[in-house]
Image (tube, rainbow, N blue to C red):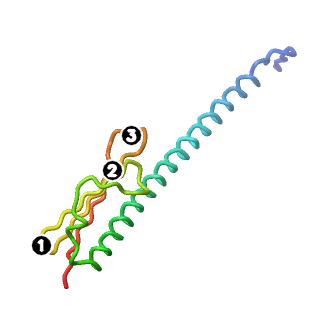
Amino acid sequence: MIRKFKPGSQDGIVLLEALAAILIFSFGILAFLWMQASATRQVTDSKYRLEASFAANQLLGDMWVHRDKWSDYIGDNQAVPGLPNGKRTVAVQGNTVTITINWKLPGESKDHKYQAVAQING
């Protein structure tokens, strides 16, 4: 026995399939946008970590060259250009130099920190 469907008896099936496809596509786009935002955040964090390490290494190089003027470098909460709300602290104990750089990104509550410890002999 062959069933015959009346024309229009499956109306709405295509609409349901289209809605399901749009829903799946929308979740895919949202996931892509979330990954893009996450990648942008990671790149920004790594940029500022690189800036902090460069500033600390540059200061260590200056201190190595000017070993007789270490007292000029020692201090707390000195501004660090290139970092948002960047502050550095330099401590010297014997031949050991500790440089701590803190910065805080706009809109974030936590501080980021980079610390370099070096022994300067000679």
Residue that carries the numbered disc 2 in the rendered image: 112
Disc 1 marks a residue whose amino acid type is Gly
Residue situated in front as seen by the camera: 95 or 38: 95
Task: Return the disc, 3 or 1, that comes first in the chain's sequence.
Answer: 1
- Residue type for callout 2: His
- Note whether 46 is above or below 2 in the view shown: below
Residue 111: image location, x then y, percent:
32, 46
State the SS at label 3: loop
**Residue 3 in the image: x percent, y percent?**
82, 18
In the displayed structure, does residue 27 sit left or right of residue 106? right
Under tag 2, what secondary structure?
Answer: strand
Mark 3 or 1: the one toward you: 1
Task: Using a 10 Å C-alpha cutoff, classify the residue at mark 1 as few (fewer than 14 neighbours), some (14 to 19) or many (20 or more).
Answer: few
- Amino acid at pointer 3: Glu
Residue under pointer 3 = 108
Cβ atoms under marks 3 and 2 closer than 8 Å: no
How many numbered marks have been drawn onto this rendered protein structure?
A: 3
